[in-house]
Amino acid sequence: LSSVLWFGAASSFVLKTYDGVSVVEGQLLTYCFDVTSSAADFRVSIVWTDPMGTPGATVSLVHDLDLSIIDAAGAWHFGNALQASDETHTLVSHRDLVNNAEQVTIESPAVGEVTVRVSGVDIASATGQLFA
């Protein structure tokens, strides 16, 4: 992929790809990255092909994976940055329950280690779910 995406000789852009990784229900996969500068955004995406659901089901997502990141400052970031109001009318982040593509973007990230987490929350297949 990096051979077809040209960012110029002076670009500091680094592309890391993981394709065909499998996760099973209850499994947590972690990937650690070292952020050396806060000048560029830190962005992570995951996507998977979800099995066909049952027609008329109230929830269409069959396999639920979650993307979360713990930045170098210890703050948590959740896939697709969904927010809802709690009982005190404060906006709180929560996990994405409906999409088979999730992304987290951290603008001007703190320098240090960033931990990317992919969780197999609800996976109906015993063989797991492939994602990229």
Image (tube, rainbow, N blue to C red):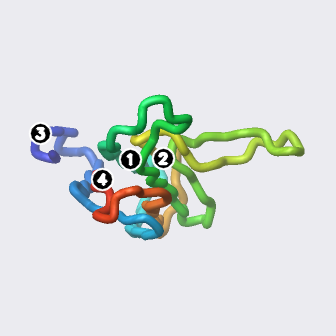
Name which residue type carries label 1. Answer: Ser
Contact, mark 2 vs mark 1 (Cβ under 8 Å): yes
Query: Can see residue 78?
Result: yes
Q: Which residue is mark 3?
A: 4
Contact, mark 4 vs mark 2 (Cβ under 8 Å): no
Q: Position of residue 34 (x, y in %)?
A: 40, 67
Q: Position of residue 28 (x, y in %)?
A: 44, 69
Query: Can see residue 40?
Result: no
For image coordinates 67% across by 40% down, the residue present is 83
Q: Position of residue 20 (x, y in %)?
A: 22, 56
Name which residue type carries label 3. Answer: Val
Frontmost of labels 4 and 1 is 4
Q: Nearer the viewer, residue 19 or 72?
A: 19
Q: Which residue is mark 4?
A: 131
Name which residue type carries label 4. Answer: Phe
Query: Which sits earlier in the primary sequence, circle 3 or circle 4?
Result: 3
Q: Nearer the viewer, residue 38 or 2?
A: 2
Q: CA distance from mark 4 to mark 1?
A: 10 Å
10 Å crowding of disc 1: few (<14), some (14-19), many (20+): some
Q: Is residue 83 above or below residue 64?
A: above
